[in-house]
Amino acid sequence: MKNDRQAIKWPKFLYRYSRSLLLGLMTLVIILGLHLLWGIPGLTQETTTLKVLVNALEAKEWSSLVEEFEEKNPQIEIEVVEGPTDSNLVENLYSTAFLLGKSPYDLVYMDIIWVPKFAAAGWLQDLSGKIAPSELQDFLEKDIEAGRYKGGLYRIPFRSDVGVLYYRSDLLKQGGYEPPENFDRLQIIAQELQQSTESNWGYLWQGKQYEGLSAMFVEVLEGYGGVWIDPETKAVGLDKPEAIAAVEFLRHAIESGITPSGVTTYTESESLRFFLNGESVFLRNWPYVWAEANKPSSPIQGKVGLKAMVHAPGESSGAAQGGWGLGIAKTSKHSEEAWKFIDFFTSRDSQKQYILDYSYIPSRRSLFRDPEVVDKYSYYPKLLQAIDNAVLRPPIPQYAQVSDILQRYLTAALTGSKTPEAAMKKAAAETRRVLGTS
Ligand code: GLC
């Protein structure tokens, strides 16, 4: 008798695998069923990628906090796109992306001066409902205020910033000098130590035509008692004698040789590099320089002091308020995940880790007095005073335009193509036109 099996002509491999195939199929059906009914973690939860553009100086420094966040939130991935170094160039990239209407960015890492423009243009989500007023109280008021626009809150500060004056404590001691308090004294000490020590230059700052020039200038301007733009009245003070004196001081620093004429190409990085190499007595820069200057590999480790910027007699020190914070793009479809990231990044613990690693300034007041922080950076309580008295660049929607005008005319004065007075008269007139007050 013929075997039944042979009577039905099953393909051979089906014979061999029919049982396991059946089992496999049944498992798949069950899994799919369960998946549809209840949703199985891992199958249903897709990974959300949040994209953010970060200035090149900080992009790498973000990595350990980003890793920690991703470990805690395995369903969220952060894609950090490294942007240019200059703040205004990063701003241009964000603005262009938003103007084109197809922004790839969910999170917006913003300089303190961008908020009025971005919020007025409708590019950001209002975050006021996401954070309790009691939670906001730990942040520095000015940093929070700078994130507000017409009743909304668009940026949560991650780190603050304030301009300071660095000096070579060893050289000053050697020459028998106390750190200077006013512009004339700085000029004298810089010149004398430049001649009597190996230091090539006396005083370095950011003179390139970019946002750093405006930030540096507001400090000198304030030190002479001048005003750029009054945000309330929109009055422009760039052609006033105090403003012209401020430009003359910078121009004179180049002419007298304490500052190299190449300063008109320097950003924070170049001026820092020369200072680190021991090539200058003074440097104007931000607090992150402290960690760089005191690294074991630094030629000037332990030879640096820092203080508030000098000022004219009878005036007080001007310090530019800087800082960076996070917002959510209006077009982002992942605002919940983006908020999780902001909440984590701006938390006390994250900020503490970041500032201990890089000597940035926290945006949370309590961290300025944290024992571990003060143990590492004894000058932080003093910096808090500086930040409380810091000058905010004009918080107006036209900020990018007016800063661009100021930078152009300062460059004309610093390179000698216009006198300080002529340059500032033009700068004031153009600024008034932009503000509609001429
Ligand atoms: C720093 C400040 C920022 C400023 C920039 C200028 O990053 O935090 O506010 O605009 O320097 O270069």
Image: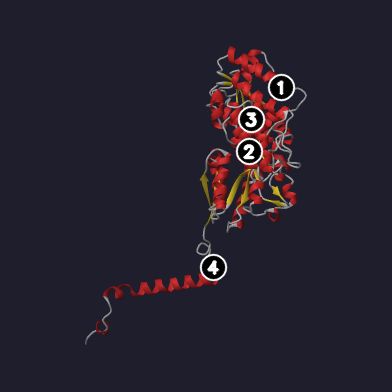
Q: Secondary structure at mark 4?
A: loop
Picture quadrant where residue 28 is located: bottom left
> In front of the other: label 4 or label 3?
3
Residue 22 is left or right of residue 171, and the answer is left
Q: Which is more N-terminal, label 1 or label 3?
A: 1
Residue 8 is left or right of residue 147, and the answer is left
Q: Quadrant of the N terminus?
A: bottom left
Instruction: Report the residue that reaches farthest toward the top.
Output: 196
Q: CA distance from mark 2 to mark 3?
A: 14 Å
**Is residue 179 visible to us here?**
no
Q: Which mark is residue 423?
A: 3
- Residue type at mark 4: give it: Gly
Q: Which is more N-terminal, label 3 or label 2?
A: 2
Residue appearing at x 72%, y 27% in the figure: 241
- Residue type at mark 3: give it: Ala
Give residue 12's position: percent from left, percent from top: 26, 75
Determine crowd level at label 4: few under 14, some 14-19, many 20+ residues with C-alpha closer than 10 A. Answer: some
Q: CA distance from mark 3 to mark 1?
A: 25 Å
Contact, CB < 8 Å: mark 4 with mark 3? Answer: no
> In front of the other: label 4 or label 1?
1
Give residue 107's position: percent from left, percent from top: 58, 51
Determine crowd level at label 1: few under 14, some 14-19, many 20+ residues with C-alpha closer than 10 A. Answer: some
Image height check: is 12 above or below 125?
below
Q: Which mark is residue 403?
A: 2
Q: Which is more N-terminal, label 3 or label 4?
A: 4
Q: CA distance from mark 4 to mark 3?
A: 67 Å
Determine crowd level at label 2: few under 14, some 14-19, many 20+ residues with C-alpha closer than 10 A. Answer: many
Residue at image mark 4: 39
Residue at image mark 1: 182
Image height check: is 380 above or below 54?
above
- Residue type at mark 1: give it: Asn
